[in-house]
Amino acid sequence: MRLNVSAHLPTSHGRHPTLLLTFAAVFALVGGLLLASSGRAGAAADPIVSTGKPATASSAETSALGAQYAFDGDPATRWASTEGTDPQWVRVDLGATAAVSRVKLNWEAAHAKAYRVEMSTDGVTWTPIAQETAGDGGTDDLTGLTGTGRYLRVYGTARGTSYGYSLFEAEVYGTLDGGPPPTGAFTVVAAGDIAAQCTASDSKCAHPKTAKLAQQINPKFYLTMGDNQYDDARLVDYRNYYDKTWGAFKAKTRPVPGNHETYDPAGSLAGYKSYFGSIAYPQGKSYYSYDEGNWHFIALDSNSFDKSAQIDWLKADLAANSKKCVAAYFHHPLFSSGGHGNEPVSKPVWKILYGAKADLVLNGHDHHYERFAPQDPEGKAKADGIVEIVGGMGGAEPYPIEEIQPNSQKRISGPYGVLKMDFTDSGYGWSYVGTDGQVKDTSPKYSCH
């Protein structure tokens, strides 16, 4: 057991097999006095706030040893980094700003000799709240902490063995601002323009890296925004490339097609339909809808926005919806600052969505990341407008930013990554996470209309 007083940066000091009873008694007495004088005297009773929360790591030895297993509440599972490399880290998104009073780390044999526990409000700038310089494995119970932030990470700087870093469980105790987490909270990973014709044996191949990141986040489900497979989206290409990476979580994926899915010599969308089957055609069409929590998700095929059948279906689907929050996703963005620019084919759909008070639209097509302020179909900023995100950085070659559009708030071209979308019963927000594990952008928090 560790007793750390938060007036200083806490440092754990390894376990000692022998203690004189006299010293133990004195230590207990002094510890009780220190806790009594602490401003966080009630922190010892703080609940765990990390179990089941989304987690990422600098690396994972295998998909069965991903970051999420350090925060799943199961002492039989674990996270393990790749072997032989320093530094390595694992982090958790607590879902809201938290006041952290205690962190308990249960190390596997591959432990950290030196590490820091750090917190961040944005996932970019980190502040140490505890450190270890002579770790000997086992359980490190760091108490009396006063860290504040949404994200917490364990940052290993020196391995205790020749292997990597491995945690059976990392328990974070504290209180979340505003009380318990929002009801109905769930996480989704989204990306478009994914699998180039390359494999992990090519160091420049990006889709194995975005797939690894997506899997480490371990969301409720995955969205793809089209052009899932390049160049002609044939079934053989899906099997040779996409399936080797993003195919690992195919059963949890809810895709839509892009224009490259129409180039298949076997017929438009033939390879796409053969590969995904009922996953992409749950209602017998290339467009469909489903509910999660208080959200209604609409997956559309923007290749056929000029067909009345899909437009009529969309109107009927929205009319029948009973959920407060609405998100739609399809390939071609109405607004984009990238090489393809604005796609007017999507404007009629935007008008329908705007009339139904939809909240969010996700797109691909242009190979960059971009977020827009709420706007109407004419591109006018409106408080009750739709938020659009372009997320085409799933693995295909990046496109440059060419002409910045009105209401564009943030643009990133170059770093590959995925959208980590956080939904609640009444709102949403997201971060754009690069394949290096760093958060490149964090959105405002939005409430549903």
Image: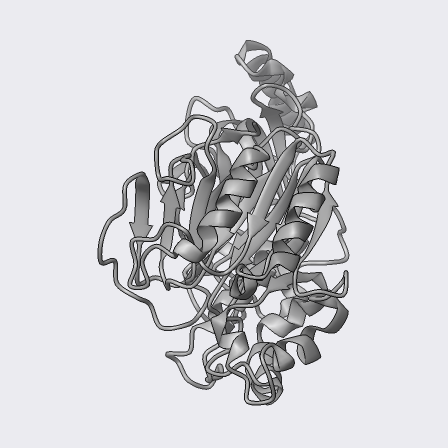
Residue at x 22%, y 58% (from the top left corner):
402
Q: Is residue 394 left or right of residue 28?
A: left
Q: Is residue 267 above or below residue 283?
A: below
Depth check: give the residue in front, 165 or 238.
238
Q: Tell me the quadrant of the picture where the N terminus can be found.
A: top right
Residue 251 in sight in this render: yes
Depth check: give the residue in front, 72 or 375.
375
Depth check: give the residue in front, 406 or 179.
406
Q: Is residue 147 left or right of residue 249?
A: left
Which quadrant would residue 33 be assigned to in this image? top right
Residue at x 43%, y 21% (from the top left corner):
7
Q: Tell me the quadrant of the picture where the C terminus can be found.
A: top right
Question: How was the colour assigned to the protein in this rendering?
Answer: one colour
Q: Residue furthest top?
A: 37
Q: Is residue 164 above or below residue 95?
A: below
Q: Position of residue 196 (x, y in %)?
A: 45, 79
Q: Position of residue 207 (x, y in %)?
A: 48, 72
Residue at x 57%, y 41% (from the top left corner):
422
Which quadrant would residue 126 be assigned to in this image? top left
Which quadrant would residue 144 be assigned to in this image? top right
Q: Residue furthest front?
A: 308
Q: Position of residue 395 (x, y in %)?
A: 44, 70
| Count of numbered circles on the image | 0
Residue 424 in sight in this render: no
Q: Position of residue 312 (x, y in %)?
A: 66, 51
Depth check: give the residue in front, 204 or 254.
254
